[in-house]
Image: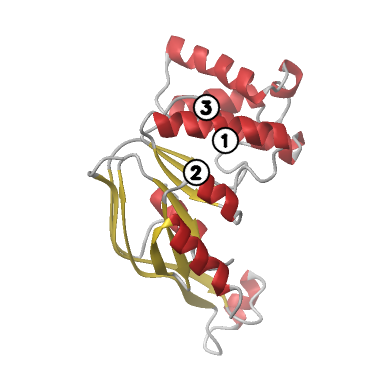
Amino acid sequence: MGTESVITVKDLYVNFWISGTGINSFKDVVMSIGKQKALEKKQVLKGLNLEIKRGECFALMGKNGSGKSTLLRTLAGIITPESGAIEIKGSVAPLLTIGAGLEYELSGYENIKIVGTLIGLRGAELKAAVQTIKDFSELSDTDLNMQIKRYSAGMMARLAFSISVCRIPDILIVDEALSVGDQGFQVKCADRINEMKAAGTTIIYVSHSLTELKRICTRGACLENGQIAKIGPIDEVGEYYTQSFLH
């Protein structure tokens, strides 16, 4: 692990707008004017600060609703923060909710080519990536010629992960994405993550499986109510996370 920081987060605030009580349609919004707040602001991340070093395997823990997925989506550029600063050095491969970023009306092959183009693959490199993704995913030509809206959760997991790791990025972000795959494919994914780890990729990993986090990560943070409650070596943060369910 290097000493250079590849991810620096300073005083990060992220807010969501949610509908107020009784607001179920545009008509309700219009009728509510002057009577109640149609939309309410919910603060999800609250002045969060974080620094992750090059080549580090970093775990994010926390109960549901603590802000883990919001933080990952913000780091991936999917969510725009309300305020604060994020500095990221290098290419990012986000493996978030299975199917996120894929076009459901298109086939597997079409999605591979579109996403491949978006991450900068061209010509022979893109053609090679298509074959690499097909081989890794173990999806057949029939599967890849089919609209992905017809895929099972397991097939979607295979395609999404295979696209994300078709080349080694500087930073890999993984959010509970492997839990739906079958056991054999999960082992294959873990092996690929270890390859990327050995190659110096910085990994940010979210999972409710403490065993899995300890196998991959060396350091981590536990989020509570949109803030970092504990940060440090994986064993210490894991113990803190476990104890949080006893109170």
Name the element at disc 2: helix
Among numbered discs 2 and 1, the one appearing first in the sequence: 1
Q: Is residue 236 left or right of residue 38?
A: left
Name the element at disc 3: helix
- CA gap, disc 3 and disc 1: 26 Å
Q: Would residue 105 be seen by someone viewing this image from the given angle?
A: no
- CA gap, disc 2 and disc 1: 8 Å
Q: State the image quarter where residue 120 is shown.
A: top left
Q: Which residue is mark 1?
A: 190
Q: Position of residue 41 (x, y in %)?
A: 47, 75
Among numbered discs 2 and 3, the one appearing first in the sequence: 3
CA neighbours of label 2 inside 10 A, class few (<14), some (14 to 19), many (20+): some
Name the element at disc 1: helix
Front label number (3 vs 1)? 1
CA neighbours of label 3 inside 10 A, class few (<14), some (14 to 19), many (20+): some
Answer whether labels 2 and 1 touch (C-beta < 8 Å).
yes
Which disc, if any, is residue 216? 2
- CA gap, disc 2 and disc 3: 30 Å
